Image: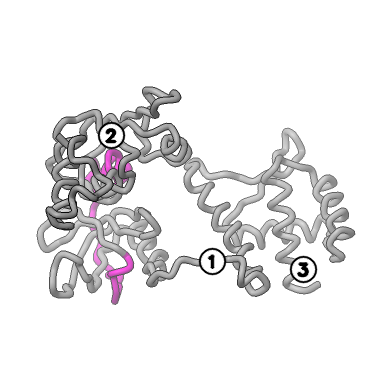
Amino acid sequence: MSKRESIARYTLIIKKLRKHPASFEQIADYLALESELQDYNFNISKRTFQRDIKDILSLYNIEIEYDFSNKVYKIGYDENPDVNERILEAFDTFNALNLSDRLSNAIHFEKRRPLGTENLYGLLHAIKNKLQVEFTYENFWEPDISERETEPYGLKEFRNRWYLLAKDLRDEQVKSFGLDRLTDLDITQTQFSLAEDFDVEAHYQHCFGIVAPNQQAPEEVILSFTPHQGQYVKSLPLHLSQEILEDNEYELRIQLKVYITHDFLMELLAHGDTLKVIQPQSLEDELKSIYRDALKRYGEDKVSESRFKVDNLN
């Protein structure tokens, strides 16, 4: 049996169990049917199926377990639902990429620089074992590349970029470092102790993005979107704290509890004239100031031609 055939069989087994648990007999019947439809031989013995379970765990990190009470096999999910979603997403992406040689005109990838994911495994090892790491870092806000010594606490993804949350030992501040700007990673043998009251999830609880101000408190934010834009905001919430206050033919009104940071402001600006800030007043005033400055960049003689209405900013 070819490796391609085995991979295709693994895919079918996962597909079957993602829908609902099944007995070995039901799985075998499903594979027999697919064998006829696809002109492959997916038929397997129970012994081969047990080997497939091990291969699926090794290849995709998807665990298939046996439910003795119901006598069925099922996918064993992690306690964290986000982990489950990303594992299955990675599985789906892997299968799509396996077809990319035959569908090169149908799959269009974003053109982007490497994201530093080659360091994910090493950093996870350092985080798990509480080992200090050293690396070279290029900060967008500083002109020179610097050497950093850190205590790694966690990893976070935001907008297709991965970030390391770590204490920078040169100033003892907890910071986020973009993995795409991190090179020459060295995992030392120096161990550190994480403060008992520090929790990575709590650190990011009120963040939009990866910036968590050390002294700033999160604020209650109320936003109003046009009904059409509101559909997108409902399907992909801006933040975990998002609550719907109004949803009717006139608006979608939501409430968030977040830090008002540069990342959050950029997100609001991206919604343009489909968004109105209801509260806090300070956020509304800041957005107005940004829009006024944007108009000035086009010159006073062109302000009247702009699609932005100055009267609405006053």
Provide residue 226's location: percent of width, then percent of height: 38, 33
Residue shown at 23% from the left, 50% from the top: 305
Relative placement, left or right, of 137 versus 100 is left
Relative placement, left or right, of 130 versus 286 is right
The image's mark for residue 26 is none
First along the sequence among labels 1 and 3:
3
Q: Give the range drawn in magenta.
A: 179-208
Q: Quadrant location of the N terminus?
A: bottom right
Report the colour scheme. one colour
Is 302 one of the magenta-colored residues?
no
Q: In front: mark 1 or mark 3?
A: 1
- Separation (CA) of disc 1 from disc 3: 26 Å
User: Where 89 sits versus 148, above or below?
Assistant: above
User: Where 7 sits versus 66, above or below?
Assistant: below
**Residue 64 can be seen, yes or no:** yes
**Residue on which disc 2 sits:** 276
Task: Classify 10 Å Cα crowding around label 1: few (below 14), some (14-19), many (20 and above).
Answer: few
- Separation (CA) of disc 3 from disc 2: 54 Å
Q: Could you say which quadrant of the image residue 213 lies in?
A: top left
Q: What residue type is labelled 3?
A: Glu
The image's mark for residue 5 is 3
- Separation (CA) of disc 2 from disc 1: 34 Å
Task: Classify 10 Å Cα crowding around label 3: few (below 14), some (14-19), many (20 and above).
Answer: few
Extreme-right residue of the structure: 36
**Residue on which disc 1 sits:** 108
Name the residue nearer the viewer: 8 or 280. Answer: 280
**Residue 283 can be seen, yes or no:** no
Provide residue 307's location: percent of width, then percent of height: 28, 47
